[in-house]
Amino acid sequence: MRILVVEDEPDLLRTIAKALRENGYAVDEAIDGSEGLSCAAISRYDAVVLDMMMPVMDGAQFLAKFRKLYTTPILILSARDTIANRVDGLNLGADDYLTKPFAMVELFARLQALIRRSLGTRDNIVTIQGVTINFGSKLVNVGKRKVELTAKEFSIIELLVLKKNRVMSRTDIFEHVYDANEDSMSNLVDVHISNIRKKLEVDIIETRRGLGYIISV
């Protein structure tokens, strides 16, 4: 899943982005609301992490402009911690609000919940044809057998499961699991899916020739 982090404090921005990448997310970074809007105009995101107090364009201004264009879930991450602050943020169009300081594991959990809800499911564990995918722990089992997937492989199967019954083109998949640091799609998606199939030994990923990939339920 691809996340946009809009945060003006450089050290915190790097820390959040690094932690999200280590947890399997693709991440783009913006230092203010204006840069965040520019990123959103170029790329599609599964969620946005948004600071409120920023120069050039603050979080409130970003929300007002962003919500006219996109329905992407937004998690506010702010040092403003009063009930009035949280209510204001949610009324402006945010979907969740987490105050600083925060635990990274809570940030991950809240983002995962937002993404699942935006795609129409609240389930944290899904089983398809004997393959169990745990979005919270990022573990995959086939029956009782644990399957070791790389972060990118898990991101791809997670995407296809969350968007089940929808054909995802190679470009769609690439844009969801790779960030702006990746220069070329080449055959990365096909290679990852081939590896997933070998590891699962259960072919739940269908190929639709000329269209892409789908997990049907």
Image: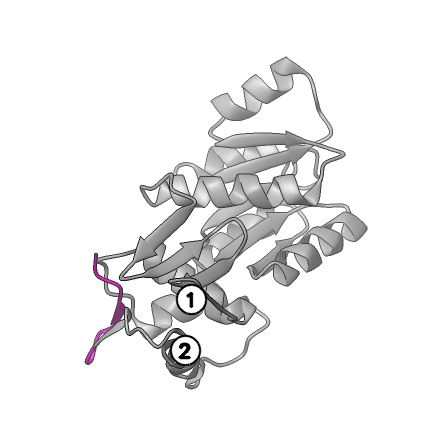
Kindly identify which numbered label has been placed on residue 90.
none
The quadrant holding residue 101 is: top right
How many discs appear?
2
Measured as percent of width and height from the top left, residue 166 is found at 23, 59
- In the picture, the quarter occupied by the C terminus is bottom left
Say which element carries label 1. helix
Measured as percent of width and height from the top left, residue 37 is found at 52, 49
The quadrant holding residue 198 is: bottom left
Q: Which residue is mark 2?
A: 189
Residue 210 on the magenta segment = yes
Q: Residue 95 versus residue 89: which sits nearer the camera?
A: 95
| Start-end of magenta stretch | 208-217
Distance of label 2 from label 1 (alpha carbons):
8 Å
Kindly identify which numbered label has been placed on residue 156.
1
- Does 181 appear above or below 132? below
Q: Are marks 2 and 1 in contact (CB under 8 Å)?
A: yes
Q: From where the camera sits, is residue 15 visible?
A: yes
- Does 116 appear above or below 144? above
Measured as percent of width and height from the top left, residue 15 is found at 75, 53
Residue at 70% of width from left, 33% of height from top? 53
- Report whether 125 appears left or right of 4: left
Magenta part, dominant SS: loop
- Report whether 21 appears left or right of 42: right
Residue at 59% of width from left, 71% of height from top? 181
What is the basis of the colouring in this image?
A: one colour
The quadrant holding residue 17 is: bottom right
* Label 2: few (<14), some (14–19) or many (≥20) C-alpha neighbours in 10 Å: many
Residue 129 on the magenta segment = no
Measured as percent of width and height from the top left, residue 48 is found at 53, 45
Name the amino acid, label 2: Val
